[in-house]
Image (tube, rainbow, N blue to C red):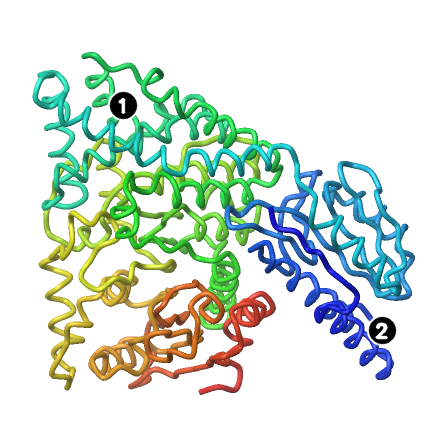
Amino acid sequence: MATLNLKSNHKIIKNYYDELNRFDRLGKTHEGAVRSAFQSLLQGCARRFDWTLIPEHAMTGRRKKRIVVDGTLIDTFQLPHGYWEAKDIHDDLPSEVLRKFERGYPRDNILFQTPHRAILWQNNQQTLDVDLTDPTQLIQTLETFFSYRPQEYTEWEEAVAQFRERVPALGNGLAGLIEKERGANREFTAAFTAFHEKCRQSINPNLSEAAVEEMLIQHLLTERIFRTVFSNPDFVHRNIIAREIETVITALMSHAFNRDEFLKSLDPFYVAIERTAATMDDFSQKQGFLNTVYEQFFQGFSVEVADTHGIVYTPQPIVDFMVRSVEEILRAEFDRSLSDSGVHIIDPFVGTGNFIVRTMREIRPTALEDKYRSELHCNEVMLLPYYIASMNIEHEFYEATGDYQPFEGICLVDTFDLAEDRQLPLFAPDNTRRVEEQKETPMFVVIGNPPYNVGQLNENDNNKNRKYQTMDAGVAETYAKDSTASNKNALADPYVKAIRWASDRIGEEGVVAFVTNNSFLDNVSFDGMRKHLADDFDVIYILNLSGNVRKNPKLSGTTHNVFGIQVGVSINFFVKQRGKTNSQAEIFYARVDEFGGRRTNIAILIQRDIIETSNGSQ
């Protein structure tokens, strides 16, 4: 385990005191100014553990109220290791500590700090009250703060090391068992064939048998987590898709297969997941932890398959920024709100549900039940994100209202298929009904993070280069037709189809809010697309987050890209207004400093919305 081993002559310690001295010479003592020095110090220490300090971190406190902590230390599994609260140099720190605890702030490893003093609480009790002007006491505070480990975290770290190789091996074992049973078990063979056909009709007509096998394996490996971690013992009965898959699993178990016995070797791993998740009161923290567990262990039962899925979860500050911005755009351009009746909202690529959950928090409490019942919609094409999104959204509604209601607005379906002129059963009858109702509903807001992998849909490596007759024709007849480029292959990227689909889906008025690859902003292949966007919309807001490592090798995906990926990113808002007579869109464009760094750019998103960011930029 990493340790700090700090000394008073180390650079990060000297830099901290030098920065405070500069503020002091300028007569600046308020929290907003001086906190940056300690924040930089914490960030420097966090890097030694491969942790990240999340500034202005919103969470649910012990009293079930939303609180915002000045900083939270998060590891690569999204687990919180400590909290930090900065105060003014003139504040009565003990009184401020009690005031925060009354509001429900955590009491396990939280550091309250002014430039002169620090109070550290761990395990529900005060452990330090020190003078930070003394470097020795500062170092003692930091080392005590960063060395804190709940027992559950220690068990989790051991479980990760022990089972990192075992989970893929178990998945491969399940694959071999399924293959064997398909040749010897008539009941299972019939159930598998029927399920495969449903998948081909619902997700992809080219879906391979191997891809369906992986869906069964993912379900088998993760069903226990949904029951226990999410406290949802009836999950497989409540979820309309899980019921269908359980039918196939039951047929598999009918012949020489016992689920509990087969998964017994993973019991310590499941227990470690359950105990670790139980340490988190905040559901969004639990969600982030499980998302990462899914990415690293259950996304695919082999490294090769997992690497090809292309799942990129949207950082929460981007989700927050986009939802806040849509609310402001609706007010500025339409005098409406996300809470208003008739404003139907859809995330066509919902992933694990972050955009819908954040939208629910933006909606007025008095309007939430009606919106939840009939005006929030989303689609997902991959099985496990669909499961997680369903439960996340339902849990958010339960937290807000105290009432559990199944979320009827989610569909397991390929959004691009909805543009095709065909009517087929889509898994269960309830899923088909939801899809048909969604298709008949006029959408006013389209929001989300569409896939952007050229030549591949975000579902499985076995199903690359999916063709969509209607969507491909729509792109060809508009964006490609008016392009002067000789090579138009880039227009085959799914995010281009997503923008084309969303442009059509909102009809004559509404808002499209997507975070996408930023190549369409200046790449010559997209000149026809830019022309149509300017013609099709009345107002366009663009925040270019840069970060194209392939174009600028001086950049680092980890350091400079908000997603930690290689391609550049932009956040885009396209607005249509009924009856507007502009011949071309009014365009507002802003760009972050390309070398500003990931943390700096995320800080910009935390502090503003798109209208504030774009103000004065055209």
Q: Which mark is residue 29?
A: 2
| Viewer-nearest residue: 3 or 281 | 3
Inter-mark Cα distance, 2 to 1: 62 Å
| Viewer-nearest residue: 517 or 301 | 301
In the drawing, does residue 32 fall left or right of residue 559?
A: right
Amino acid type, label 2: Thr
Q: Is residue 190 visible?
A: yes
| Viewer-nearest residue: 266 or 516 | 266
Q: Position of residue 417 (x, y in %)?
A: 17, 51
How many discs appear? 2
Q: Earlier in the sequence, mark 2 or mark 1?
A: 2
* Residue behind mark 1: 246
Quarter of the image holding residue 295? top left
In the drawing, does residue 403 fall left or right of residue 209?
A: right
Amino acid type, label 1: Glu
Mark 1 secondary-structure assignment = helix
- Residue at 88% over, 63% down: 134
In the drawing, does residue 613 fall left or right of residue 474?
A: right
Q: Is residue 575 visible?
A: no
Q: Position of residue 36 (x, y in %)?
A: 72, 70
In the drawing, does residue 226 fall left or right of residue 486?
A: right
- Residue at 50% over, 32% down: 273
